[in-house]
Image: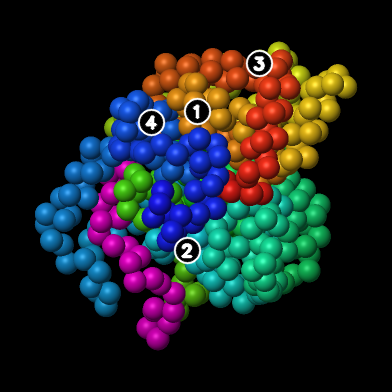
Amino acid sequence: MTLNDRYLNPQVGRIVRTLGFDKTWVGGEGAHLIASSGQHYLDLFGGYGVFAIGRWHPQAVAAVEAVMEARTGNLPQLGVTLLSGVLAEQLLARAPGSVGAMVPANSGTEAVEAAIKVSRAATGRPRILYAEHAFHGLTLGSLSLNGNAEFRDGFGPLLPGCDAVPFGDQDALRRELERGDVAAFVVEPIQGKGVNLPPAGYLQAAQGLCKDAGALLVCDEVQTGLGRTGRFLALEHWGLQPDLICLSKALSGGLVPIGAVLVSRAAFDTVFDGMERAVRHGSTFGGNDLAAAAALATLRVLEEEGLIERAERLGRLLLELTRPLVDRYEVVTDVRGQGLMWAIEMGPPGGRARRSVWKAVERAQPGLFSQLITVPLFHEHRIFCQVAGHRMNVIKALPALVVEESEIRRFAAALEDVVARAEHVPSALARFGLQTGRRMLAGGAQR
Ligand SMILES: Cc1ncc(COP(=O)(O)O)c(C=O)c1O
């Protein structure tokens, strides 16, 4: 922490200390982080969703070790390697028929940057549409598609031609597309910020509207992909056939940075249409052997261990256990999710006294009430979870798909315990909230 405060990000240090999350993490295993006390904490951050197959999965570790042992002819640059070819083949075999080529990358934001560039170059059009509340990454191109002012403010001017439409609003999308200058609509099938599910029929309609307008549909599956929602790709829930699909996070088992964009053959061939244009997009480390080997192991583990079906089954169980909280507690306004991407939303309680406590806490810092849930979950139940975005009372869980059913049940029971207390002992919590609010800066490590 001393080194962090001196050389890295002291404001993150302040947040972590204020919430009492400043453990010394000495290890990780499956769905858990291990503190120096030896205690296991159920990790519902999942490294922002990278640990779908669990931390340090032996097969993924072995695959990376095998590449190092083999001293492969990695990154020849003007040349090709076997592992990234096999990875492209394996990903495309699991993706819808609308995509037929892969552009390698090293992160989610890089995958989105590639999607923006490919869409513009393939269509010859300038504009990119994105949804309000979207999160696609924090480099300048993907930040230009970010639907949250907290991230954008102060970094402008951002990319011209990027316009937001309300998530779920077909008419707004149609109006923008009708201008005839849209290269692509970039959308998360389920929004990570807030875990917002699309209204029925929306994504299918968006696909049709894009097709009619000659615009490309880009599904950002960086968070929802790789089994998280109970399908290999979330887009399978709606039978989508997008032109581009962005992947990252869980793809390499949380071991090696990775990203990839699956692209329709037609779009790809328009962009890379001659030898002189062969390297007009790329990245030095993209398609490296360590990442590809970890990704191939991840695909194998997902299938051998039945983790995608497991995500669906445990996700259903988690909803069954937690949805009743909406009826039992005034402060719980919604519980939602798909597979093991889950969220609970809180709102003000009824009754003048309690409502005024809520307002006081929220005045100290909007969205602070949810920290009154996450903090006792951490300290009393050893459950590590996150708020789903700035200034929102939504708590989110992205557990490893290998999580035990007993841990899902333990989480649901712990949640009810802290929600019940948050509702019934407002003044003590308000004291905590006001103290915390005064100390905390607005914003934080919320993804
Ligand atoms: C949907 C989505 N797209 C893109 C990104 C950016 O990924 P990265 O942090 O690897 O740049 C994220 C990260 O949270 C994400 O959730």
Mark number, residue 214 = none
Residue behind label 2 places its C-beta within 8 angstroms of ligand 1 = yes
Q: Which residue is pictured at 34% across the width and 44% down the height?
A: 253
Q: Which residue is situated farthest in the bottom direction here?
A: 276
Give the alpha-carbon distance from disc 1 to disc 4, as whole Å: 15 Å
Mark number, residue 378 = 1
Q: Position of residue 214 (x, y in %)?
A: 66, 65
Q: Label 2 amino acid? A: Glu
Give the alpha-carbon distance from disc 3 to disc 2, as whole Å: 42 Å
Give the alpha-carbon distance from disc 4 to disc 2, as whole Å: 27 Å
Q: Which residue is mark 3?
A: 420
Range covered by the magenta-colored residues: 274-299
Q: Position of residue 371 (x, y in %)?
A: 62, 33
Q: Position of residue 25 (x, y in %)?
A: 35, 38
Q: SS at mark 3?
A: helix
Q: Which residue is mark 4?
A: 31
CB under 8 Å between callouts 1 and 2?
A: no
Q: Residues within 10 Å of mark 2 (few under 14, many from 20)?
A: many
CB under 8 Å between callouts 4 and 2?
A: no
Q: Nearer the viewer, mark 3 or mark 4?
A: 3
Q: Position of residue 289 (x, y in %)?
A: 25, 59
Please say whether residue 211 is visible from this viewpoint. no
Mark number, residue 110 = 2
Say above or below: 368 vs 348: below
Q: Nearer the viewer, mark 1 or mark 2?
A: 1
Q: Label 3 amino acid? A: Ala
Q: Residues within 10 Å of mark 3 (few under 14, many from 20)?
A: some
Upstream in sequence: badge 1 or badge 4 = 4
Q: Residues within 10 Å of mark 4 (few under 14, many from 20)?
A: many
CB under 8 Å between callouts 1 and 4?
A: no
Q: Label 4 amino acid? A: Ala
